[in-house]
Every structure is written in C-alpha cells, then in structure tokens.
Image (cartoon, rainbow, N blue to C red):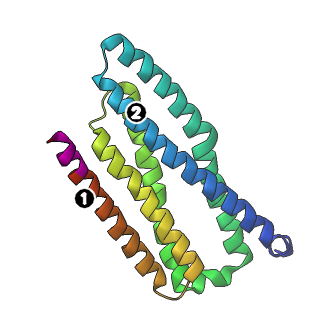
C-alpha cells in the first residue's frame, strides 16, 4: 500500500495522459465513422476503396490507441482510488464515476458502430454520427468541470453553458444551410 501512496502523483499523471489519449481516439473514431458513412454516396468502386481504407484506419485506431487508452485510464484511476480511498466518500467522485460509466458505455457503443460499418449493416447517418460525436464532448466537459470544481455545483453550470452553446451552434448551422439553399 505504501508503494501506491508514494507513487500517487505518477498514477495521476498517467491517468491524465491516458484520458487525453482515450478522448482523442474517441473523437477521431467517430469522425472516421462519418467519413465511412459518407463514402456510401460515392460510385461503387470509389466507395469500396474508401470503406476498405476506413476499416483499416478504424481497426488500428481502436485496437492500438483508443481501447488501450481506455484500459490505461481505468487502471490508473483505480490505482489512484486504491491509494486514496477517501476519494470514494466524496459525492463529486460518485458523480464522476457515473460519468465514467456512461463514457464506458459510449466506448462500447462506438465499437458496435465500427463493427456494423465494417460489415455494412450500420443504420447511422452522418448527421446522427455528428450528434453522437458531441456526446463524448459533453462527457469530457462534465468530467473536467466536476474534477476541477469538486463540491461546488459550478460543474453543472459549465455543462449547461456548454449545452447552450452547442444548441446555438446547431441552430446557426441549420439556419446557414437554409439560407445557402435559398
């Protein structure tokens, strides 16, 4: 146990590094899903080449970066909690762990999307995938605000503000598309 406590800062640094890598992988993965889906509108020979390439890119990103980063995040987070079990008595940590559980579900839903894209059975549109990509962003914002602000409810304001900006941006984009069509 002394070893865990003595190296708490190392576990924390590694946890942060793996969190950053995990989110980078998730953000890029869903972007690849969008491109993969949009390749369906191309001529058949071009579509096949693009989708084969996207399958390769997705597999490498998922199994070499994203999933190992998720495992590292959970491993080093667990080491931090083991070294400092008092964290588990704090209400903000319960909320954070709930967000992390949601993020894990998000991760495995992304894996399912990847597999369905690979076998051609995905029903996701590029528009739905663009919205899906924002779920990870919302989770990131919620977790960071929560960890930094801890016991205050300021994290909730940050998440609500982020949501508000996101909605305003989506409305602006839709208005721009309408104006451009006219």
Res 48 → quadrant: top left
Please name whichever residue, 131 or 86, is drawn nearer the observer in this view of the structure.
Answer: 131
Please name whichever residue, 58 or 100, is drawn nearer the observer in this view of the structure.
Answer: 58
Sequence-earlier tag: 2 or 1: 2
Q: Determine whether, in the image, residue 88 is placed left or right of residue 176.
A: right
Residue 132, image x, y percentages: 36, 51
> Dot 2, how many residues are within 10 Å of its Cα: few (below 14), some (14-19), or many (20+)?
some
Mark nearest the camera among 2 and 1 is 1
Which type of secondary structure does the marked residue at label 1 adopt? helix
Residue pointed to by mark 1: 171
Report the residue at 38% width, 15% height from top. 46
Q: Residue furthest bottom?
A: 152
Q: Determine whether, in the image, residue 70 is placed left or right of residue 44.
A: right
Q: Determine whether, in the image, residue 11 is placed left or right of residue 39.
A: right
Residue 144, image x, y percentages: 55, 70
Res 32 → quadrant: top left
When the figure is inspected, residue 41 is found, relative to residue 164, above or below; the finding is above
User: Where, quadrant-wise, is the N terminus in this rendering?
Assistant: bottom right
Residue pointed to by mark 2: 35
Measure the C-alpha gap from mark 2 to mark 1.
Answer: 23 Å
């Amino acid at each position: 146990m002394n070893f865990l406590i003595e190296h708490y800062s190392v576990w924390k640094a590694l946890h942060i590094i793996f969190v950053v890598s995990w989110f980078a992988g998730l953000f890029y993965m869903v972007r690849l899903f969008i491109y993969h889906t949009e390749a369906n509108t191309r001529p058949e020979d071009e579509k096949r080449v693009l989708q084969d390439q996207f399958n390769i890119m997705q597999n490498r990103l998922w199994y070499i970066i994203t999933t190992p980063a998720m495992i590292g995040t959970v491993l080093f987070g667990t080491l931090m909690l083991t070294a400092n079990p008092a964290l588990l008595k704090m209400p903000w940590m319960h909320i954070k762990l709930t967000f992390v559980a949601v993020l894990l579900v998000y991760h495995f839903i992304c894996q399912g999307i990847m597999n369905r894209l690979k076998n051609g059975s995905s029903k996701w549109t590029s528009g739905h995938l663009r919205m899906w990509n924002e779920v990870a962003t919302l989770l990131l914002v919620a977790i960071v605000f929560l960890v930094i602000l801890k016991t205050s409810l300021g994290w909730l304001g940050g998440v609500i503000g982020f949501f508000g900006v996101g909605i305003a941006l989506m409305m602006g984009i839709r208005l721009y598309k309408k104006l451009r069509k006219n």
